[in-house]
């Protein structure tokens, strides 16, 4: 925060502590003048900056109010962390750090399979062994910006697989990358795998369950894809595909599998999840989607996805109706 922003936020806090009670929280009682109209500080155009930073919210009538101090500090920390992450990732990309490190390792330990496949133009690269595949996944997801499409034909994930994939997937979701995942129906019978997938859903992932055979594939940003060299023995390695025509074909295959799959059932399909309850509560307190998403600690895309899902479940035509129906059902107190 700048000194000016700090001053304005503190002025808002002081104003809020002296604001008289009102029948409608969005506006002051008619018999009391709004302190904002009396204090030139609180009419400062820099108030818009406080709203952008997540330190204040603006009601429909234009009145700006401070968020509670814990939320304000949390918003500042999140904003700084996002900026720092973007700055560091930009430096890594600009300096080609990963490419340089990969060249060092290849020069020191040339692959015994060098020269096979189409490695010269990098359209199709053979990756041998599970370590090489995981390394490729790390690199692809590090640079992912918009979308990650994944399938798990077996459905059941080993504890080791969950341990490896959790930080990767959480990193993607924190950055607002849209994550879609299709799992084999066996996931419904495995407690650990089911708990992990539901954890991902609470952070914004979209997950479906297929009761039909599906192919193993990972597609990142619709520009690169990984498929097994041998579908019956995935530990053997994978093909890293960047050829646009082949990637497009794999995307079409993925979309067909997605349409044929079912939504991952919740722990109790009749009740909202914890994050859905928070979304419903924010319909009454947050004036903007950006503010609500920041409060939840998720991307705005994730927040809107949860909201759209809730509106479909409630059969609501708009947000106000969704809040009313949720209250009638006892989802909101």
Image (cartoon, rainbow, N blue to C red):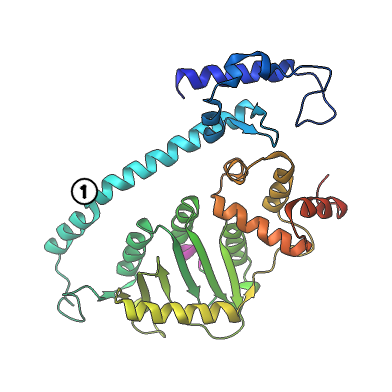
Q: Secondary structure at mark 1?
A: loop
Say which quadrant the C terminus sits in: top right
Residue 189 is situated, as x and y percent measured from the top left of the image, at 65, 73
Residue 146 is situated, as x and y percent measured from the top left of the image, at 44, 60
Q: Is residue 12 above or below residue 313?
A: above
Q: Is residue 160 magenta?
A: yes
Q: Which residues are magenta?
A: 158-162
Horizontal side of 211 relative to 144 (left or right) equals right
Does the rendering let one see residue 203?
no
In the foreground, 234 or 78 = 78
Residue 147 is situated, as x and y percent measured from the top left of the image, at 45, 63
Instruction: Pick out the residue farthest to the right.
Output: 328
**Label 1 crowd bin: few (<14), some (14–19), many (20+), radius 10 Å:** few
Identity of the residue drawn at 55% across and 21% down: 44
Q: Is residue 255 above or below residue 315?
A: below
Residue 121 is situated, as x and y percent measured from the top left of the image, at 18, 74
The quarter holding residue 29 reads: top right
- The residue that label 1 is drawn on is 95
Identity of the residue drawn at 77% across and 54% down: 322
Identity of the residue drawn at 47% across and 82% down: 253
Does the rendering let one see residue 224?
yes
Identity of the residue drawn at 49% across and 74% down: 151
Figure disc tally:
1
Secondary structure mostly taken by the magenta-highlighted segment of the chain: helix
Q: Is residue 88 magenta?
A: no
């Amino acid at each position: 925060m700048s000194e000016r922003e700090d001053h304005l936020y503190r002025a808002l806090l002081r104003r809020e502590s002296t604001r008289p009670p009102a029948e409608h929280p969005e506006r002051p009682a008619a018999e009391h003048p709004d302190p904002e109209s009396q204090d030139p500080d609180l009419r400062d155009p820099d108030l818009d900056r406080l709203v952008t930073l997540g330190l204040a919210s603006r009601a429909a009538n234009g009145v700006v109010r401070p968020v509670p101090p814990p939320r304000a500090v949390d918003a500042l920390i999140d904003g700084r962390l996002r900026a720092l992450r973007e700055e560091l990732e930009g430096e890594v990309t600009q300096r080609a750090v990963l490419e340089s490190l990969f060249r060092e390792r290849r020069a020191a330990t040339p692959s015994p399979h060098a020269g096979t496949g189409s490695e010269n133009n990098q359209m199709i690269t053979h990756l041998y062994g599970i370590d090489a595949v995981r390394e490729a996944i790390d690199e692809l997801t590090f640079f992912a910006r918009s979308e990650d499409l994944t399938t798990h034909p077996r459905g059941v994930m080993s504890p080791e697989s969950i341990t490896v994939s959790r930080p990767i997937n959480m990193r993607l979701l924190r950055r607002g990358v849209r994550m879609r995942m299709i799992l084999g129906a066996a996931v419904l019978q495995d407690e650990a795998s089911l708990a992990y997938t539901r954890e991902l859903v609470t952070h914004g992932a979209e997950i479906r369950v297929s009761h039909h055979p599906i192919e193993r594939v990972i597609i990142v940003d619709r520009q690169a894809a990984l498929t097994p060299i041998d579908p019956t023995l995935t530990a053997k390695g994978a093909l890293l595909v960047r050829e646009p025509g082949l990637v497009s074909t794999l995307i079409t295959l993925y979309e067909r599998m997605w349409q044929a799959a079912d939504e991952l059932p919740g722990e109790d399909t009749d009740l909202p999840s914890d994050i859905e309850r928070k979304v419903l509560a924010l319909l009454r307190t947050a004036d903007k989607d950006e503010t609500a998403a920041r409060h939840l600690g998720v991307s705005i895309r994730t927040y809107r996805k949860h909201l759209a899902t809730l509106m479909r479940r409630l059969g609501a035509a708009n947000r106000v109706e969704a809040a009313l129906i949720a209250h009638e059902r006892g989802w909101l107190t």
